[in-house]
Image: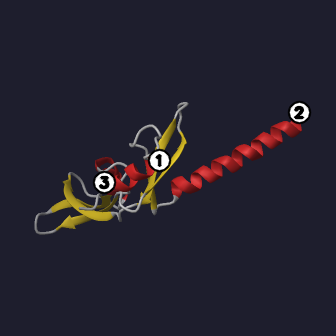
């Protein structure tokens, strides 16, 4: 019984790591908005994303979905600044404020004092959609 458990564990780990490689790869995006898999899956993908490749594959349900794999557009870095009430000894306060203002966008903050305005500010850098 222990051998079966070990074999299933190894199989699960191999399957999970293969799936994670596809998901972690930052240069390839995956879109499943094309719906159930049909014979024109690849054509739909190419129409939606130039250079994409449509592949039929399993989904969480019982039906196969049309998955579209394509090269991700480059991420653009944006900047924003805002004033804060109190000063900060390091960037931690601004890092947290920027992450709260731009969740999931890799926001980082730098704390600074605007001498001409006599106010503290947070300067945020975050990833935004390319335009």
Task: Identify whether 124 is placed above or below 43.
Answer: below
Q: Earlier in the sequence, mark 2 or mark 1?
A: 2
Q: Secondary structure at mark 2?
A: loop
Q: Secondary structure at mark 1?
A: strand
Disc on res. 98: 3
Residue 7 in which image quadrant: top right
Spatial separation of the CA atoms under disc 2 and disc 3:
51 Å
Q: Tally the marks.
A: 3
Spatial separation of the CA atoms under disc 2 and disc 1:
38 Å
Task: Report the residue at 11% width, 64% height from top.
Answer: 117
Q: Quadrant of the N terminus?
A: top right
Q: From the viewer's perspective, tell me whether residue 2 is left or right of residue 36.
A: right
Q: Earlier in the sequence, mark 3 or mark 1?
A: 1
Q: From the viewer's perspective, tell me whether residue 111 is left or right of residue 10.
A: left
Label 3 crowd bin: few (<14), some (14–19), many (20+), radius 10 Å = many
x, y (%) of residue 97?
31, 51
- Which of these two is toward me, 41 or 17? 41
Spatial separation of the CA atoms under disc 3 and disc 1:
34 Å
Q: Which residue is mark 1?
A: 67
Q: Residue furthest top?
A: 62
Q: Which residue is mark 2?
A: 1
x, y (%) of residue 2?
87, 36
Task: Report the residue at 40% width, 62% height from top.
Answer: 51
Q: Quadrant of the C terminus?
A: bottom left
Q: Residue furthest bottom?
A: 116
Label 2 crowd bin: few (<14), some (14–19), many (20+), radius 10 Å = few
Q: Residue furthest left?
A: 116
x, y (%) of residue 105?
35, 54
- Which of these two is toward me, 116 or 21? 21
């Amino acid at each position: 019984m222990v051998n079966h458990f070990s074999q299933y564990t190894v199989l699960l780990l191999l399957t999970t790591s293969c799936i994670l490689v596809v998901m972690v790869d930052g240069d390839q995006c995956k879109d499943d908005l094309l719906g159930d898999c049909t014979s024109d899956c690849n054509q739909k993908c190419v129409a939606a994303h130039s250079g994409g490749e449509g592949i039929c594959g399993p989904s969480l349900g019982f039906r196969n979905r049309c998955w579209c794999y394509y090269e991700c557009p480059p991420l653009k870095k944006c900047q924003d600044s805002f004033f804060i009430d109190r000063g900060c000894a390091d960037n931690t306060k601004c890092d947290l404020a920027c992450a709260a203002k731009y969740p999931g966008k890799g926001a980082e903050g730098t704390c600074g004092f605007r001498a001409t305005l006599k106010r503290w500010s947070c300067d945020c850098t975050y990833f935004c959609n390319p335009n």
